[in-house]
Image (tube, rainbow, N blue to C red):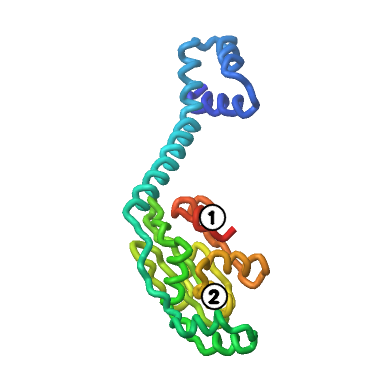
Amino acid sequence: MEEKELIKRIRNSFQAKKSRAEILTGFQKRGYKLEYADKLISKAKFPKTTILLTLTALVIFCIAFGSSSLLNKQKMELSNPLPTTTGNMIALSSNTSQQEGIIDQIEITPEFISYLLNELSAWKLHSNPINFEKPIINFKIGNKNFYSEIGNEIETYDGLSQKADLQFNINKEDLINAINSNNPSTVLKQSITNGKTQLEIFANEAELFSKGYLNFYNILK
């Protein structure tokens, strides 16, 4: 019997929950030398061991890469794009319709999104260490769309990206209130809890982990 076929049978035996000793006994009964049988078993188990070692090394590399990337990054110093007078008017207004009127007059620009993400610690995100793809987050605010790429800076553009890892579907009022708050994450968490904001996740868990989204996600939980 060819060696490849013997290795295949050994793997089938392992899948059938047979022990190494049982497989060796079977080989001895068929007249195979113990040394040769042991060599075949090692070959049969090698790919699984290699995959495990590779995955372990990959996880360690991702953690090390993320840690080193984070050491070189700092929170950006971005000015709040919301004029101070407008922010004060919103905060002081006790009349809901009056507050809505003030918010309606505000034009959302890319600067609003970059500022909010920076306050939500998105600056801690980093590129995938394997394919070097940057974290990308979409924002859908009514009929206005934006997407942000996070590298050394948070760069926001008009439109939605097909490569986004996740997307915020948020109303204008909650977006402004979050930007106007001393604790934006609390405003967003409340909005998500109330169902007024939806967080859509497009990337798989491995991709999110490799880009450091765990901390960012926990802020919004």
Which residue is tagged 1? Answer: 204
Q: Position of residue 205 (x, y in %)?
A: 54, 52
Pointer 1 or 2: first along the chain? 2
Q: Residues within 10 Å of mark 2 (few under 14, many from 20)?
A: many
* Above or below, comparing residue 123 to residue 46 in the picture: below
Front position in the image: 148 or 161: 148
Left or right: 130, with 185 as reference point: left
Q: Residue furthest right?
A: 194
Front position in the image: 63 or 194: 194
> Which residue is located at x 61 percent, y 15 percent?
22
Number of disc labels: 2
Q: Nearer the viewer, mark 1 or mark 2?
A: 2
Q: Quadrant of residue 170?
A: bottom right
Quadrant of the drawing holding the C terminus:
bottom right
> Which residue is located at x 59 percent, y 26 percent?
14
SS class of the residue under badge 2?
helix
Q: Quadrant of residue 131?
A: bottom left
SS class of the residue under badge 1?
loop
* Above or below, comparing residue 178 to residue 205 in the picture: below
Mark 1 vs mark 2, CA separation in Å: 26 Å
Which residue is tagged 2? Answer: 175
Front position in the image: 22 or 111: 111
Which amino acid, mark 2? Leu
Which amino acid, mark 1? Asn
Left or right: 46, with 28 as reference point: left
